[in-house]
Image (cartoon, rainbow, N blue to C red):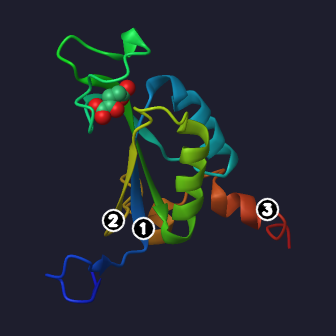
Amino acid sequence: LPIIRAQNSPDYIPVANFYKVEAILRPWRIQKVSSALLKIGIRGVTVSDVRGFGAQGGSAERQAGSEFSEDNFVVKVKMEIVVSKDQVEEVIATIIGEARTGEIGDGKIFLSPVADVIRIRTGERGEKGERMTGGRADMFSAGSSST
Ligand code: AKG
Protein backbone atom coordinates (compact mmCIF):
# COMPACT_ATOMS: atom_id res chain seq x y z
CA LEU A 1 0.00 0.00 0.00
CA PRO A 2 1.23 3.52 -0.69
CA ILE A 3 1.85 5.29 2.57
CA ILE A 4 1.55 9.01 3.17
CA ARG A 5 4.27 10.19 5.60
CA ALA A 6 7.00 7.96 6.93
CA GLN A 7 5.87 4.39 7.45
CA ASN A 8 7.43 4.21 10.88
CA SER A 9 5.55 7.30 12.03
CA PRO A 10 2.70 6.56 14.46
CA ASP A 11 0.42 8.88 12.47
CA TYR A 12 0.96 7.48 8.99
CA ILE A 13 -2.12 7.23 6.79
CA PRO A 14 -2.42 4.10 4.63
CA VAL A 15 -4.10 4.93 1.31
CA ALA A 16 -6.29 2.36 -0.41
CA ASN A 17 -9.24 2.18 -2.80
CA PHE A 18 -11.12 -0.11 -0.42
CA TYR A 19 -11.56 -0.16 3.31
CA LYS A 20 -12.85 -2.74 5.74
CA VAL A 21 -15.33 -1.44 8.29
CA GLU A 22 -15.33 -3.90 11.18
CA ALA A 23 -17.98 -3.26 13.80
CA ILE A 24 -18.41 -4.99 17.15
CA LEU A 25 -22.11 -4.65 17.91
CA ARG A 26 -24.91 -5.68 20.23
CA PRO A 27 -26.51 -8.82 18.75
CA TRP A 28 -30.03 -7.40 19.08
CA ARG A 29 -29.09 -4.35 16.97
CA ILE A 30 -27.79 -6.36 14.01
CA GLN A 31 -31.13 -6.48 12.19
CA LYS A 32 -31.55 -2.69 12.36
CA VAL A 33 -28.00 -2.12 11.19
CA SER A 34 -28.15 -4.54 8.26
CA SER A 35 -31.47 -3.26 6.93
CA ALA A 36 -30.20 0.32 7.08
CA LEU A 37 -27.08 -0.75 5.20
CA LEU A 38 -29.24 -2.45 2.55
CA LYS A 39 -31.14 0.84 2.09
CA ILE A 40 -27.95 2.73 1.26
CA GLY A 41 -26.90 0.07 -1.26
CA ILE A 42 -24.51 -2.02 0.79
CA ARG A 43 -24.76 -5.66 -0.33
CA GLY A 44 -21.76 -7.49 1.00
CA VAL A 45 -21.90 -8.00 4.75
CA THR A 46 -20.28 -10.74 6.83
CA VAL A 47 -21.28 -11.39 10.43
CA SER A 48 -19.69 -13.58 13.09
CA ASP A 49 -20.79 -14.46 16.59
CA VAL A 50 -18.01 -13.27 18.86
CA ARG A 51 -17.33 -12.70 22.53
CA GLY A 52 -15.15 -10.03 24.03
CA PHE A 53 -14.67 -7.28 26.52
CA GLY A 54 -13.69 -3.63 26.52
CA ALA A 55 -12.68 -1.09 29.13
CA GLN A 56 -15.22 -2.44 31.63
CA GLY A 57 -13.78 -5.95 31.46
CA GLY A 58 -17.13 -7.26 30.36
CA SER A 59 -18.42 -7.01 33.92
CA ALA A 60 -19.99 -3.56 34.20
CA GLU A 61 -23.60 -2.51 33.69
CA ARG A 62 -25.32 -5.89 33.81
CA GLN A 63 -28.58 -4.42 32.60
CA ALA A 64 -29.15 -7.34 30.24
CA GLY A 65 -28.08 -10.57 31.92
CA SER A 66 -28.50 -12.65 28.80
CA GLU A 67 -25.79 -10.63 27.07
CA PHE A 68 -23.16 -12.11 29.41
CA SER A 69 -21.55 -15.52 29.27
CA GLU A 70 -20.13 -17.38 32.30
CA ASP A 71 -16.55 -16.27 31.80
CA ASN A 72 -17.41 -12.53 31.65
CA PHE A 73 -16.85 -12.20 27.93
CA VAL A 74 -19.79 -10.37 26.48
CA VAL A 75 -21.62 -11.88 23.53
CA LYS A 76 -21.40 -9.57 20.52
CA VAL A 77 -21.68 -9.77 16.76
CA LYS A 78 -18.81 -8.72 14.52
CA MET A 79 -19.95 -7.22 11.24
CA GLU A 80 -17.43 -6.84 8.43
CA ILE A 81 -18.06 -4.75 5.33
CA VAL A 82 -15.54 -3.93 2.61
CA VAL A 83 -16.48 -0.82 0.65
CA SER A 84 -14.86 1.66 -1.68
CA LYS A 85 -13.29 4.71 -0.14
CA ASP A 86 -16.17 7.05 -0.99
CA GLN A 87 -18.67 4.90 0.95
CA VAL A 88 -16.72 4.65 4.18
CA GLU A 89 -18.12 7.64 6.05
CA GLU A 90 -21.74 6.89 5.14
CA VAL A 91 -21.36 3.29 6.29
CA ILE A 92 -19.84 4.39 9.59
CA ALA A 93 -22.58 6.98 10.15
CA THR A 94 -25.27 4.39 9.34
CA ILE A 95 -23.84 1.86 11.78
CA ILE A 96 -23.61 4.44 14.56
CA GLY A 97 -27.11 5.67 13.80
CA GLU A 98 -28.62 2.19 14.20
CA ALA A 99 -26.31 0.63 16.82
CA ARG A 100 -25.94 3.43 19.35
CA THR A 101 -27.96 3.27 22.55
CA GLY A 102 -25.70 5.62 24.50
CA GLU A 103 -25.12 2.94 27.15
CA ILE A 104 -21.87 1.13 27.95
CA GLY A 105 -21.42 -1.82 25.59
CA ASP A 106 -22.49 -0.21 22.30
CA GLY A 107 -19.27 -1.54 20.75
CA LYS A 108 -16.61 -0.16 18.45
CA ILE A 109 -15.81 0.29 14.78
CA PHE A 110 -12.39 -0.43 13.31
CA LEU A 111 -11.37 0.89 9.89
CA SER A 112 -8.57 -0.70 7.88
CA PRO A 113 -7.29 -0.32 4.32
CA VAL A 114 -7.85 -3.29 2.01
CA ALA A 115 -5.38 -3.94 -0.82
CA ASP A 116 -7.78 -5.60 -3.28
CA VAL A 117 -11.18 -7.28 -3.67
CA ILE A 118 -11.32 -10.44 -5.79
CA ARG A 119 -14.54 -12.20 -6.83
CA ILE A 120 -13.76 -15.91 -6.75
CA ARG A 121 -16.34 -16.87 -9.40
CA THR A 122 -14.97 -14.58 -12.11
CA GLY A 123 -11.53 -13.57 -10.95
CA GLU A 124 -12.58 -9.90 -11.21
CA ARG A 125 -10.52 -7.54 -9.11
CA GLY A 126 -10.71 -3.96 -7.90
CA GLU A 127 -13.92 -2.02 -8.61
CA LYS A 128 -15.37 -4.93 -10.60
CA GLY A 129 -14.57 -7.34 -7.82
CA GLU A 130 -16.24 -5.12 -5.24
CA ARG A 131 -19.40 -4.24 -7.21
CA MET A 132 -22.54 -6.11 -6.10
CA THR A 133 -25.71 -6.62 -8.16
CA GLY A 134 -28.43 -4.33 -6.82
CA GLY A 135 -25.87 -2.38 -4.87
CA ARG A 136 -24.69 1.17 -5.03
CA ALA A 137 -23.33 1.20 -8.56
CA ASP A 138 -26.67 -0.13 -9.86
CA MET A 139 -28.68 2.33 -7.77
CA PHE A 140 -26.77 5.33 -9.15
CA SER A 141 -26.72 4.16 -12.77
CA ALA A 142 -30.43 3.20 -12.86
CA GLY A 143 -31.44 6.44 -14.62
CA SER A 144 -28.78 6.35 -17.30
CA SER A 145 -28.64 2.65 -18.06
CA SER A 146 -31.48 2.84 -20.64
CA THR A 147 -29.68 5.33 -22.87
C1 AKG B 1 -16.79 -3.70 28.37
O1 AKG B 1 -16.32 -4.76 28.74
O2 AKG B 1 -16.10 -2.72 28.09
C2 AKG B 1 -18.25 -3.53 28.22
O3 AKG B 1 -18.67 -2.59 27.62
C3 AKG B 1 -19.13 -4.53 28.85
C4 AKG B 1 -20.58 -4.17 28.72
C5 AKG B 1 -21.21 -4.68 27.44
O4 AKG B 1 -20.54 -4.83 26.44
O5 AKG B 1 -22.42 -4.93 27.45
Tag 1–tag 2 contact (CB < 8 Å): yes
Which residue position holds label 3? 142
Q: Amino acid at mark 1?
A: Phe
Q: Which mark is residue 114?
A: 2
Q: Quadrant of residue 110?
A: bottom left
Q: Quadrant of residue 138?
A: bottom right
Q: Which mark is residue 18?
A: 1
Q: Nearer the viewer, mark 2 or mark 3?
A: 2
Label 1 crowd bin: few (<14), some (14–19), many (20+), radius 10 Å: many
Q: In which quadrant will I find the N terminus? A: bottom left
The image quadrant in which ligand 1 is located: top left
Tell which of 83 and 145 is nearer to you.
83
The relative height of residue 142 versus residue 126 in the rendered view (above or below) is above
Q: Nearer the viewer, mark 1 or mark 3?
A: 1
Q: Amino acid at mark 2?
A: Val
**Disc 2 residue lies near ligand 1 with CB under 8 A:** no
